[in-house]
Amino acid sequence: MSAPFLIKRLFYMVLTALVVSVIVFGVTQLLPADAAVMILGENATPEAMEALTRRLGLDRPAPIQYLDWLGGVLTGDFGVSLRTGQPVGPTILAAFGRSAMLALLSLIAVSLIAIPLGVWAASRRGKAADLGVSVVSYLGISLPEFVLATLLLAWLAGPSVGMFPASGYASPFDSPIAALHHMALPVITLSIVLMAHISRMIRSEMVDTLESDFVRAARLRGLSRRQVLYSHALRNSMLPAITVIALDIGYLIGGVIVVEEIFSFPGVGRQLILAIQNRDLPMIQAGALVMSMTYALANLGADLTYAALDKRIQFS
């Protein structure tokens, strides 16, 4: 990986962050909400409304408000929640940590199951096992996460099975077992769709790679089937899959919002929904910015990993 490429990507990253901050702030300014009304209620006097608007600095021009907000963000100050009166930063940071745990467990589950499943299906191309994996993958892709979450909720958390709690959260610092128990259904929901997508991608790439000349040469050199599959074919098939996995992180971020709401999981997605319902503008701005930047960082990580794995790739 060349230094110019790294500098260029970091520059684009900063530029993206700046554009995202403008969009997030601009969109929240268009929401049909008045912070003074949200805090004081609709029955407050016009004088009280005007005084609070001045105190919050909302009577200033929008560009000035944006620069003030951006300066706070750069120093870690996201403002104060209009609903709770508490600083937004610690609330969003705690919620983001819980969502990140969900996403990390989902990615680990996907990596441990989807990649071997795709390799296994490709090595049995055209056979019943390959067809079975394809059918299951199509089913997984076809099921929206809210449908899947509802089915799992009714089945595994229902009164007849009752294997997992239907909602809530337990801190892993207090009880790791209870934390995993509460996160099981959200993680299963997020993982199933990703598994279907990534296993199909791995399977498709592996089929093409297994027919390439260097794989035939590896077989002629007497390498075992396992060595050919995992030491040669899988490494090359993983390169395009990395990009897909990074894009799926974007899906994961969007899916987290729905899944957290269904399972009442107190992550950043649920925090964002609560903020929108209450027109809590500082919380909306912080939540949207954090989620957008997480997606941008995932893409940056994918590009850097791609460049590190394949030295032949030259980025201009």
Image (cartoon, grey):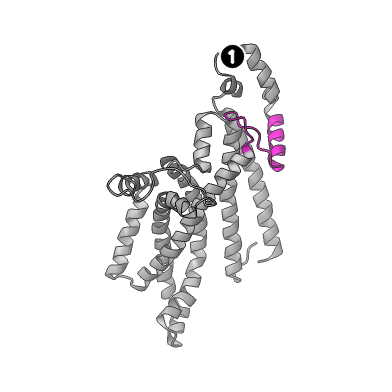
Q: Which residues are magenta?
A: 63-88
Tell me the kind of residue under disc 1. Ala
Above or below, comparing residue 118 to residue 290 in the picture: below
* Depth order, front residue of 8/301: 301
Label 1's element?
A: loop
* Depth order, front residue of 41/122: 41
Using a 10 Å C-alpha cutoff, classify the residue at mark 1 as few (fewer than 14 neighbours), some (14 to 19) or many (20 or more): few
Q: Residue at x 33, y 49 (%)?
A: 156
* Depth order, front residue of 9/69: 69
Q: Residue at x 35, y 58 (%)?
A: 137
Q: Position of residue 258 (x, y in %)?
A: 44, 42
For the N terminus, give its image quadrant: bottom right
Answer left or right for 150 relative to 106: left
For the C terminus, give its image quadrant: bottom right
Residue ID for mark 1: 44
Q: Position of residue 64 (x, y in %)?
A: 72, 30
Above or below, comparing residue 284 to residue 163 in the picture: above
Answer left or right for 28 relative to 207: right
Residue 5 visible at all: yes
Residue 293 located within the stretch drawn in magenta: no
Above or below, comparing residue 306 to residue 160 in the picture: below
Q: Residue at x 38, y 44 (%)?
A: 166
* Depth order, front residue of 309/261: 261
For this orientation, the residue located farthest to the front is 174
Q: Position of residue 100 (x, y in %)?
A: 54, 51
